[in-house]
């Protein structure tokens, strides 16, 4: 991998770009701008308690363009999300603002905001973490086990609490 | 859409990548509602979705590289067997659950290594798709590897079935590492990768899982190749018949 990159130095603006690199670039409009407020009001179609901003789907906002990124390659909600954002912008009078999808840098669970993680937990979904065990969102126990690596959607795994015996979803960390 | 000159090496490279993902995704979809348990059913469907997502990106990019106005849907639903560029492994029948998991393990282990290298491709689209998908493919490789261990080191029956599943799929491994003129040119331009550079790592990973599963690797057989040039087994035509029936019969159908 390293060798390949070395063979093509400087080619491709976003090659190997990380989240930190991306955030160090001009973020566009201030977060209290109206367009951001409109996007804060667009819920994720699968987990409506969090917005597309909470999930880190919105990358950047300018007067001309909203830049978004898909969460998982196979996420069937991707097209719905793009349409919902388009509809919300249109309804708020921003018909001239384009919606552009980018793949790089790839989305990871690090892009979910702290507010988003708290909302997920309140909703009963264990937020992504690198801990070996999940914390039960119902009773707070860490005596939990994975039932299936794939849950009700591609972004979640199925877990069970050994204390309160409730099953729960855990957002997959990657 | 404006017609631009076709970059044939890029077009064929993207078709090979996209067709692998498309056909295996379609195969996994056949399991929907038939898996041994609901958790496994979800696993298979979700892996299939990941692969179809990859295929959409790769085939849309292939259409753009070809410059003749075809998009991913057109390439997926309106080509015949001889125009498909996937490897033989992904078109193999599902068989029983063990045979499906053996196929997935051999493929996903390869695809993870391939995408890790392609994340540094000189083609920005390939690099972006690979960097995004490699995290998901790692999950596929782990999941299928765990099933190889669980079935291989399980009951007499599960062990026999996993041995038979590996036997069936083993002869399609060499094609994954085949490097023909087109693949060599793609690698030389930095848009593709010579898969032989990660063959040793592939063999090591496969070997580790087989050891943990207390299985021995099947004997090498005469390899079967040709998928990258459109020569396929009889199985692919049946896959396409199911996959392409609706859009071919009702070309204007929309959701």
Image (cartoon, coloured by chain):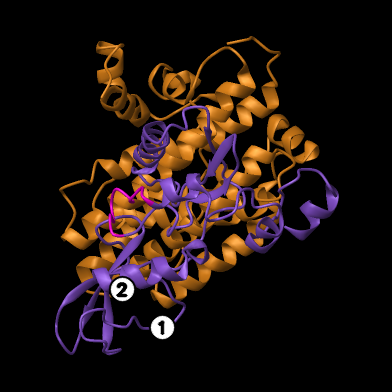
**Chain for disc number 1:** A
Of labels 2 and 1, the one closer to you: 2
Magenta stretch: give its range.
Answer: A41-49
**Residue occupied by mark 1:** A132
Instruction: Compare residues A91 and B62 and report the one nearer the observer.
Output: A91
Residue B228 picture location, percent across and down: 56, 31
Q: Residue at x 63, y 38 (%)?
A: B125
**Is residue B227 among what the camera can see?**
no
Instruction: Compare residues A4 and B146 and report the one nearer the observer.
Output: A4
Q: Is residue A42 magenta?
A: yes
Q: Dot 2, crowdedness within 10 Å: few (<14), some or many (≥20)?
A: some
**Is residue B203 among what the camera can see?**
yes
Q: Residue at x 37, y 69 (%)?
A: B146
Q: Dot 1, crowdedness within 10 Å: few (<14), some or many (≥20)?
A: few
The number of discs equals: 2
Q: Quadrant of the C terminus of chain B?
A: top left
Q: Colour of chain B?
A: orange
**Chain for disc number 2:** A
SS category of the residue bearing label 1: loop
Classify residue B246 by image quadrant: top left
Residue B24 picture location, percent across and down: 39, 41
Q: Residue at x 49, y 21 (%)?
A: B71
Q: Quadrant of the N terminus of chain B?
A: top right
Question: Relative to B94, is B213 on the left or the right?
Answer: right
Q: Is residue A88 above or below residue A21?
A: above
**Residue occupied by mark 2:** A121
Q: Colour of chain A?
A: purple
């Amino acid at each position: 991998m390293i060798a390949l990159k070395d063979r093509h130095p400087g080619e491709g603006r976003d090659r190997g770009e990380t989240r930190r690199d991306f955030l160090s670039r001009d973020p566009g409009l201030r977060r209290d701008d109206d367009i951001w407020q409109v996007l804060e009001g667009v819920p994720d179609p699968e987990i409506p308690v969090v917005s597309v901003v909470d999930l880190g789907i919105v990358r950047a906002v300018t007067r001309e363009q909203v830049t978004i990124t898909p969460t998982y390659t196979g996420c069937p909600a991707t097209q719905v999300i793009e349409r919902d954002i388009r509809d919300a912008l249109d309804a708020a009078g921003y018909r001239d603002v384009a919606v552009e999808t980018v793949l790089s840098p790839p989305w990871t669970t690090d892009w979910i905001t702290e507010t988003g993680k708290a909302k997920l937990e309140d909703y009963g979904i264990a937020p992504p973490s690198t801990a070996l065990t999940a914390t039960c969102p119902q009773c707070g126990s860490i005596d939990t086990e994975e039932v299936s690596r794939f849950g009700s959607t591609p972004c979640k795994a199925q877990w069970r609490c050994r204390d309160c015996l409730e099953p729960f979803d855990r957002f997959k960390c990657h | 859409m404006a017609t631009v000159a076709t970059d044939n090496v890029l077009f064929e490279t993207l078709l090979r990548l996209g067709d692998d993902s498309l056909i295996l995704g379609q195969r996994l979809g056949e399991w929907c509602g038939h898996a041994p348990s609901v958790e496994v059913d979800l696993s298979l469907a979700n892996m299939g979705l990941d692969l179809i997502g990859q295929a959409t990106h790769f085939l849309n990019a292939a259409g753009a590289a070809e410059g003749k106005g075809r998009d991913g849907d057109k390439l997926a639903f309106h080509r015949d067997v001889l125009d498909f560029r996937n490897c033989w492994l992904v078109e193999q029948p599902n068989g029983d659950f063990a045979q499906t998991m053996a196929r997935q393990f051999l493929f996903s282990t390869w695809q993870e290594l391939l995408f890790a290298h392609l994340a540094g491709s000189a083609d920005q689209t390939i690099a972006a798709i690979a960097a995004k998908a490699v995290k998901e493919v790692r999950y596929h490789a782990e999941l299928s590897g765990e099933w190889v261990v669980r079935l291989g080191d399980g009951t007499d029956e599960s062990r026999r079935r996993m041995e038979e599943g590996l036997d069936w799929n083993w002869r399609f491994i060499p094609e994954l590492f085949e490097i023909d003129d087109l693949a060599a040119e793609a690698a030389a331009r930095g848009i593709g990768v010579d898969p032989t550079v990660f063959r040793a790592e592939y063999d090591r990973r496969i070997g580790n899982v087989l050891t943990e599963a207390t299985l021995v690797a099947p004997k090498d057989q005469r390899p079967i190749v040709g998928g990258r040039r459109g020569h396929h087994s009889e199985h692919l035509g049946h896959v396409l018949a199911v996959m392409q029936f609706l859009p071919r019969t009702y070309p204007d159908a929309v959701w």
